[in-house]
Image (cartoon, helix red, strand yellow):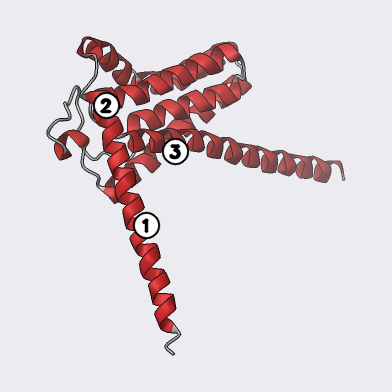
Amino acid sequence: MNTRTPFLKIINFLGLFFCVSLMNAQNIDVDILHNINVNRNTSLDGTFRVVTNSALPISIATPLIIYSVGLIKKDSTTKKTALFIGESFVVSAFITTALKYTTKRQRPFNAYADIEKGTAGPGFSFPSGHTSVAFATATSLSMEYPKWYIIAPSFAWASAVGYSRMHLGVHYPSDVLAGAIIGSGSAYLSYKLNKWINKNSNEEQKILKNNELK
């Protein structure tokens, strides 16, 4: 009996299962976008264009304003907070751009004739860059200022940015979900990295002080 035959059957079954699951996921992705975009209230297009266009300005302005406050008050902690938020933005933008040029997914309005494009959408689709930077800003801001009146509006805005990308037909739901994960993950990664750097810096300073006392 050939022992490879059952193994090959299992591999073929798993391969077929993966392909079918991927096709079903793609169909669900398109169906959700279709319901959001094609059946949308077009009178809200202008509002969602304002929301979608706010992603980059707010994500850039937030760390700049906080850093300016730190300079005025001569507060090094506030300046470090601003740098952390800025780093989260840069990391999320870098990961998003790298994935866009790796996956090269077509925009939905290019792939499906019934999807209406409601705003500019150059380049590739996966993941959503606007959603990524919005969630990076919302997450990093919430980590530094863990108050409900900061967290709630921050994530409400970031979620509105993500929804606006689907409403305007420039992203699939999976693009938006991936963008939200990347943005929040970038903030968490930047937070952990800064914590590790500060810990090592403090340890080095202690060693130097101890050497001076000897």
Q: In which quadrant of the rendered view does residue 52 lie?
A: top left
| Disc 3 target residue | 182
Q: Position of residue 155 (x, y in %)?
A: 48, 21
Quadrant for residue 183, please give it: top left
Q: Secondary structure at mark 3?
A: helix
Mark yes or no: residue 183 visible: yes
Q: Nearer the viewer, mark 3 or mark 2?
A: 2
What label sits on residue 35 in the rendered view? 2
Q: Nearer the viewer, residue 72 or 94?
A: 94
Residue picked out by circle 1: 18
State the residue at coordinates (72%, 38%). Answer: 202
Marks 1 and 3: in contact by CB < 8 Å?
no
Mark 2 → mark 1, Cα distance in angstroms: 26 Å
Give the image location of residue 60, x and y in percent: 39, 23
Q: What amino acid is at disc 3?
A: Ile
- Cα separation, mark 3 vs mark 1, equals 24 Å
The amino acid sitting under disc 1 is Phe
